[in-house]
Image (spheres, grey):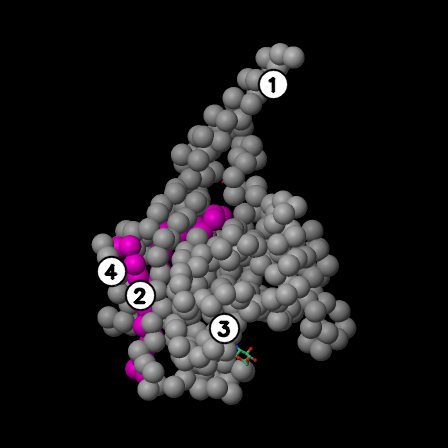
Amino acid sequence: MQKPMASLSYSSLLFLTTLLISWFMVSSSANFYQDFDITWGDGRARILDNGQLLTLSLDKASGSGFQSKNEFLFGKIDMQLKLVPGNSAGTVTAYYLSSQGPTHDEIDFEFLGNLSGDPYILHTNVYSQGKGGREQQFYLWFDPTADFHTYSILWNPQRIIFSVDGTPIREFKNPESVGVAYPKNQPMRLYSSLWNADDWATRGGLVKTDWSQAPFTASYRNFNADACVWGSGSSSCSSSSPSTGNSTNGGWLNEELDATSQERLKWVQKNYMIYNYCADAKRFPQQFPPECGIN
Ligand SMILES: *[C@@H]1O[C@H](CO)[C@@H](O)[C@H](O)[C@H]1NC(C)=O
Ligand SMILES: *[C@@H]1O[C@H](CO)[C@@H](O)[C@H](O)[C@H]1NC(C)=O
């Protein structure tokens, strides 16, 4: 049977719109010189291999860190990290999006080091309007120090999805329907740092950093941002998107978990999640925070 004309032109319109929108969203790939500024650490953060690799290091005197040149208001951010090997107890490698000020928004990945052979903890959190306290923690199903793995944040107006090597580990749905603020008005920069947190990081602070193992080093490569870049008060997406709107974009801006991804998320949450604030009845004896009901 022949396809009706109307649906043909509709789908080509859709295609064109998607194409247009994807032009205006900035997709930048891996050049650390171009995309990031080293912000602290006095030479302990280094960009190598023509901008393809970045390393952070920590010794007794200081850690180090970097931040993106761009600010984003929604996006899909990927980075490959290889964490501090060996005895990394007491060290924390943080990789997060954040805005500024007392009512800031923040989306966090933090990697809490451990003794050789003991598991890292991947700690996640979401702040909106200055309020955090929404921790979920995981063990990983591989050794994150043996090789590079991809850690991604998908942030769109409906949800935040944390993924590891393409497997979603956490979804935080926009909780405005239950009266809780959601990060959607404040552009955020990407930050990363390696620092000493042996007062709390490993087994709650019981295991201290062994400085005889210093310097500790974490490595980064293959940064990619499919994102709306914020500049001079407007977003690269909304200012340029056609009047048909961006809801026709089939990409990350409207992405949700399909059935397969939901299964994988459940698998991770069942087998690798070690803390969930929404299940911590000691901490919330009266009732769980409202967003727990929709997540
Ligand atoms: C470190 O290893 C211990 C023992 O296996 C474990 O209880 C803890 O969760 C691990 N991770 C951190 C960051 O403490
Ligand atoms: C999507 O389009 C609407 C209307 O055109 C606009 O208000 C909104 O800011 C856009 N969203 C993004 C993320 O650009």
In the picture of the structure, the residue carrying the numbered disc 3 is 120
Which badge, 4 or 2, comes first in the chain's sequence?
4
Q: Earlier in the sequence, mark 2 or mark 1?
A: 1
The CB of the residue at mark 2 lies under 8 Å from ligand 1: no
Q: Magenta stretch: residue 169 in it?
A: no
Are the residues at dot 4 and dot 3 in contact (C-beta closer than 8 Å)? no
Q: Earlier in the sequence, mark 2 or mark 3?
A: 2
Answer whether residue 230 is visible to the viewer in this image. no
Screen quadrant of the C terminus: bottom right
Picture layout, residue 200 above or below residue 292: below
Label 4 secondary element: strand
Badge 3 local density, few (<14 within 10 Å), some, or many (20+)?
Answer: many
Q: Quadrant of residue 86?
A: bottom left
Q: Position of residue 68 (x, y in %)?
A: 36, 56
Q: Which residue is label 1 attached to?
A: 7
Answer with mark 4 or mark 1, whichever residue precedes in sequence: 1
Question: Quadrant location of residue 247?
Answer: top right
* Rendered view: 37 above or below 286: above
Q: Are the residues at dot 4 and dot 2 in contact (C-beta closer than 8 Å)?
A: yes
- The type of residue carrying mark 3 is Tyr
